């Protein structure tokens, strides 16, 4: 009689799947990418390019205002633009996001203040950390349970021969082994991954707060001085890019109103 055995196959539970899935859910967002093409308004407005980015500017005898998309390509939500104001007069000028109004499809859109943006970053971070902690805890329990009960599948085959006949046979056996130490180790591994994920969310929030520091805030601009900062449009815009979609800004300074138009297009 001859017997040929196959090596045991170990069925391992995908204990990392829950944590990976949780992270994927939290980081999934709109995949549509758009660009904003500057469009001049009136003869006094000029368009110049800097590293491929179009900058719109208006210059009078006593002041100058310019605007451009902060990023060459952007997600459809929370579009960001950089604005600058130069005071060429002889008196101080107070300049802030209150000087700017944004319109999308003829509807006025709010602009983030610095405090609003920081509060939102913190709120999102805490919500994601709480979700990761809950799902990570469930994953750790599931991994510990699965790893402490390891299953081995063994297949065998062979044949029995005699002077008059030849008989083959085949089959398999399934064995489940209880190993609490493996369960403890697996649970600790997933728990460690959860802690790492919480820390990464903390670092991400810190990076976002550093980026928010470039937002335009209320500033007194002295004569022959300039201020610049980012404007983030709040609750704008949907992922459906329509023909002639446009973001329009109205900037008021020293009693004058300047218009800046940016056509929204899908990025190739």
Image (cartoon, rainbow, N blue to C red):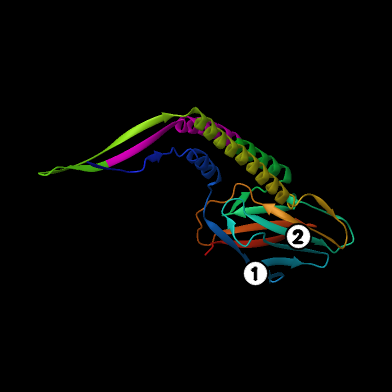
Task: Give the x, y percent position of residue 133.
Answer: 58, 33
Dots 1, 2 in contact, CB < 8 A: no
The answer to whether residue 112 is visible is: no
Which part of the image, by quadrant, shows the N terminus?
top left
Judge whether 133 appears above or below 69 on screen.
Answer: above
Q: Quadrant of residue 159?
A: top left
- Give the Cα distance between marks 1 and 2: 18 Å
Checking the image for residue 52, the label placed there is 1
Please identify the residue farthest to the front as the structure is shown. 163
As rendered, which of 134 and 208 lies closer to the eye?
A: 134
Judge whether 29 appears above or below 153 on screen.
Answer: below
Q: Quadrant of residue 259?
A: bottom right
Q: Please check the rendered image and state whether residue 105 is part of the magenta-colored stretch, yes or no.
A: no
The answer to whether residue 156 is visible is: yes
Task: Give the x, y percent position of residue 77.
Answer: 58, 51
Task: Give the x, y percent position of residue 227.
Answer: 80, 58
């Amino acid at each position: 009689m001859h017997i040929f055995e196959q090596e045991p196959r170990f069925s391992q539970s995908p204990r990392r799947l829950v944590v990976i899935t949780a992270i994927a859910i939290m980081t999934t967002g709109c995949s549509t990418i758009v660009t904003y093409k500057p469009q001049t308004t009136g003869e006094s407005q000029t368009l110049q390019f800097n590293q491929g980015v179009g900058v719109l500017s208006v210059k009078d005898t006593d002041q100058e205002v310019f605007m451009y998309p902060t990023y060459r390509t952007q997600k459809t939500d929370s579009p960001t633009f950089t604005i600058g104001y130069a005071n060429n007069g002889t008196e101080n000028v107070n300049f802030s996001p209150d000087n700017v109004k944004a319109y999308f499809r003829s509807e006025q859109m709010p602009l983030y203040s610095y405090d609003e943006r920081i509060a939102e970053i913190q709120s999102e971070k805490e919500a994601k950390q709480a979700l990761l902690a809950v799902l990570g805890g469930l994953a750790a329990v599931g991994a510990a349970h699965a790893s402490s009960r390891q299953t081995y599948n063994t297949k065998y085959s062979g044949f029995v021969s005699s002077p008059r006949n030849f008989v083959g046979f085949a089959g398999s056996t399934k064995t489940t082994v209880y190993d609490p130490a493996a369960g403890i180790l697996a649970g600790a591994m997933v728990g460690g991954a959860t802690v790492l994920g919480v820390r990464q969310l903390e670092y991400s929030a810190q990076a976002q707060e550093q980026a928010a520091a470039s937002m335009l805030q209320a500033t007194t601009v002295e004569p022959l001085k300039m201020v610049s900062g980012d404007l983030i449009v709040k609750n704008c815009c949907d992922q459906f890019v329509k023909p002639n979609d446009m973001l329009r800004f109205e900037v008021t300074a020293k009693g004058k109103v300047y218009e800046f138009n940016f056509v929204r297009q899908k990025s190739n």
